[in-house]
Image (cartoon, grey):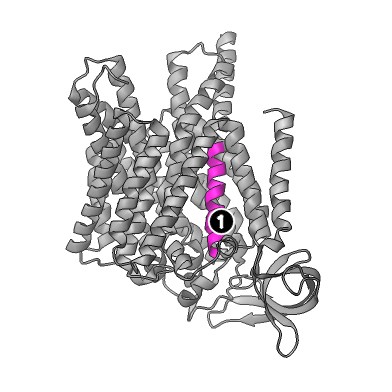
């Protein structure tokens, strides 16, 4: 048995112990997400337009992550709508930034790994960098929107008469609570995955200016800051959608 | 959000970018501004895997903007491909870092693009959003990031001084300090914080232990350390350290959530038994763990996209491309997942054992 299979089994068993059926669903969502991610890469390799393929698969990835979580129907629908809007926002921000910074492709630090590979493959790597940044933000956006939507849904189901303006204030309070820790998840993920790169920079005496302008570092930094922007904007957008849905619900109740 | 705020944010972002466009004097490296570009004809080329690309030559006319040769006009030749994998197409107005050669006469080669302006712009957006949406809370968030970055840099420094000999130990100590500082900032000094801290530390330690046992039992089959990027020291301990730091944030996130909710629950209904508290903790954790594992999964996997694509385009099989690029990301994701699930169990147990109804 390979190590990956073994670790996967350990994770599956632990998830079943903690979550029962929900544990199996969560594990499956991880497996399916991986499948979609890999399929996305294959489609891009077949020269389908990278950004469009990424956006389409992002919507699917978001829906799997959100609808397969244990959130209630109202919460998960709200979370999904909110995260798709955030996704659009991220796309709008990331495209000009990536073209401006030109962080696509590989840096000098990758030279050793690229030995023997042809880099003239006819796929625009700036677009690939855009795809990478969008994909790496998906999990964080989905998690934040589920957390806020579930919190608000809890409030709505307990106080059905709540005004949508009050709900907006509550949403911001919940958002403030989750943001501090969500930012930590992102930044530690970033520190962890770039540890080797940081040691490289330190070992080779890069100056602050050199690190900041370095292609590989800049690419990772941009991806993580864009995710951060995504998570922060998730707070007002999710709250806004939830209060919009509440307003509509009140209206339809009035009619009856 | 008022119009004045929006105006202030936009002004702040452009000011940050403008400053970076004109900070050339702060750099020791020579910077060159492209004033005019002359593009040559494109040449079609095909590699051994039938990938079609186009090769372009361009002539840059520009001015050196800093250092001894500031103001000197210079002509530089550049070539680029459509894929931009290792090269860039330069355009008018861009600033580039160049290496100057004075022998036999002044000429130069381009090293890289100056990228600080877009980064500053993006940072400005993020910081202003944090302040607009979170108000004062934004200060805590930003200071926590700053403190952690400094700690991280110090640890890298110590690791380098040791030639990477004790990388796991250094980063384990760092992990403990990271948790202590972050949780102190988020929760303040309280019993809740201590419960969270012990849950986080035990869960992380148990995760690393389980990982090492699994690696031992399976002889690390399917783990290709040679595919790790930017490795300057022994890869295996470095990989463990990477995962250790990477999962820490998610585990803290989760433990804070669970312990805080359980403390509130116990406060409201002090008659609940330890077992009840444990069960509620599991209930909360069950719903958070799935999305949380996906956060790290996407961070770890997305960055392998470019290299995997290149492998596929170089005629490698799906299996080989996965093994050499994505398998380590997959391994990290699974290990993080184990850590996240263990945290649910441990923080529920610890909260059940140590949190009493009469304190906040």
- Give the residues drawn in magenta, as a range: A216-232
- Chain letter of mark 1 equals A
Placement of A216 over or under B98, stated as above or below: above
Judging depth in this view, the residue of A198 and B252 nearest the camera is: A198
> In the figure, B157 relative to B53: above or below?
above
Q: Is residue B38 visible?
A: yes
Q: Is A55 covered by the magenta stretch?
A: no
Q: Position of residue B297 (x, y in %)?
A: 40, 51
**Element under disc 1:** helix
**Image vertical order of residue B170 relative to residue B142, above or below:** below
Figure quadrant of the C terminus of chain B: top left
Q: Position of residue A36 (x, y in %)?
A: 45, 53
Q: Could you tell me if residue A28 is visible in this image?
A: no
Find disc 1 in the rendering and name its residue: A131
Image quarter where the N terminus of chain B lies is: top right
In this view, B331 is above or below B121? below
Residue at (34, 46) in percent of width and height:
B177
**Residue A225 drawn in magenta:** yes
Crowding at dot 1, Cα within 10 Å, few <14 / some 14-19 / many 20+, comes out as many
Q: Residue at x 38, y 41 (%)?
A: B181
Q: Locate residue A101, reporting x and y percent.
A: 65, 60
> Which SS does the magenta portion mostly show?
helix
Which of the pair B6/B341 is nearer the observer? B6
**To which quarter of the image does residue A122 belong?**
bottom right
Residue B321 appears at what percent x and percent y? 42, 69
Q: How many labels sit on residues?
A: 1
- Residue at the far front in the pictured view: B68
């Amino acid at each position: 048995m390979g190590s990956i299979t073994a670790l996967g089994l350990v994770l599956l068993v632990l998830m079943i112990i903690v979550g029962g059926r929900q544990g199996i669903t969560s594990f499956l969502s991880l497996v399916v997400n991986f499948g979609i991610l890999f399929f996305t890469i294959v489609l891009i390799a077949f020269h389908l337009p990278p950004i469009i393929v990424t956006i389409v698969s992002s919507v699917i990835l978001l829906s799997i992550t959100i609808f397969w979580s244990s959130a209630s129907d109202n919460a998960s629908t709200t979370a999904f709508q909110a995260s798709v809007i955030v996704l659009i926002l991220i796309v709008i921000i990331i495209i000009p930034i990536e073209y401006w910074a030109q962080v696509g492709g590989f840096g000098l630090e990758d030279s050793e790994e690229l030995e023997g590979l042809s880099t003239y493959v006819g796929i625009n790597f700036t677009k690939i960098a855009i795809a990478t940044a969008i994909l790496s933000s998906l999990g964080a956006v989905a998690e934040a929107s589920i957390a806020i939507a579930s919190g608000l849904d809890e409030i709505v189901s307990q106080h059905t008469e709540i005004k949508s303006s009050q709900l907006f204030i509550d949403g911001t309070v919940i958002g403030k609570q989750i943001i501090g820790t969500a930012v930590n998840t992102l930044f530690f993920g970033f520190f962890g995955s770039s540890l080797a790169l940081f040691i490289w920079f330190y070992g080779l005496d890069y100056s602050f200016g050199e690190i900041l302008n370095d292609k590989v570092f800049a690419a990772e930094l941009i991806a993580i800051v864009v995710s951060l922007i995504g998570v922060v904007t998730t707070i007002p957008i999710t709250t806004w959608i939830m209060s919009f849905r509440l307003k509509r619900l009140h209206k339809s109740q009035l009619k009856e | 959000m008022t119009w004045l705020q929006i105006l202030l944010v936009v002004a702040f972002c452009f000011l940050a970018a403008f400053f970076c466009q004109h900070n050339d004097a702060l750099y020791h490296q020579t910077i060159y501004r492209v004033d005019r570009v002359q593009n040559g004809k494109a040449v079609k080329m095909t590699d051994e895997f039938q990938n079609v690309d186009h090769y372009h030559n361009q002539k840059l006319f520009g001015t050196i903007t800093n250092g001894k040769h500031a103001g000197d006009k210079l002509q530089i030749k550049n070539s680029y491909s459509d894929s931009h994998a290792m090269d860039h197409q330069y355009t008018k107005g861009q600033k580039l870092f160049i290496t100057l050669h004075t022998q036999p006469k002044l000429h130069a080669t381009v090293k890289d693009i100056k990228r600080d302006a877009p980064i500053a712009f993006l940072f400005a957006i993020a910081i202003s959003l944090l302040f607009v949406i979170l108000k004062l809370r934004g200060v805590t968030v930003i200071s926590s990031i700053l403190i952690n970055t400094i700690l991280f840099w110090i640890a890298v420094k110590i690791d380098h001084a040791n030639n990477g000999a004790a990388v796991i130990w250094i980063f384990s100590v760092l992990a403990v300090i990271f948790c202590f500082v972050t949780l102190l900032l988020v929760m303040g000094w309280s019993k809740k914080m201590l419960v969270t801290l012990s849950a986080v530390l035990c869960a992380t330690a148990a995760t690393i232990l389980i990982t090492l046992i699994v690696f031992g039992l399976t002889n690390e089959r399917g783990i290709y350390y040679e595919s790790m990027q930017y490795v300057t020291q022994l890869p295996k301990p470095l990989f463990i350290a990477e995962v250790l730091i990477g999962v820490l944030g998610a585990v803290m996130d989760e433990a804070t959530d669970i312990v805080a909710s359980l403390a509130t629950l116990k406060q409201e209904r002090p008659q609940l038994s330890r077992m009840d508290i444990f069960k509620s903790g599991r209930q909360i954790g069950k719903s958070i763990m799935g999305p949380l594992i996906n956060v790290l999964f996407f961070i770890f996997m997305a960055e392998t996209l470019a290299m995997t694509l290149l492998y596929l385009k170089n005629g490698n099989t799906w299996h080989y491309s996965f093994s050499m690029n994505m398998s380590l990301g997959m391994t990290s994701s699974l290990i993080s997942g184990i850590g996240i699930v263990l945290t649910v169990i441990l923080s529920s147990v610890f909260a059940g054992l140590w949190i009493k109804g009469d304190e906040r």
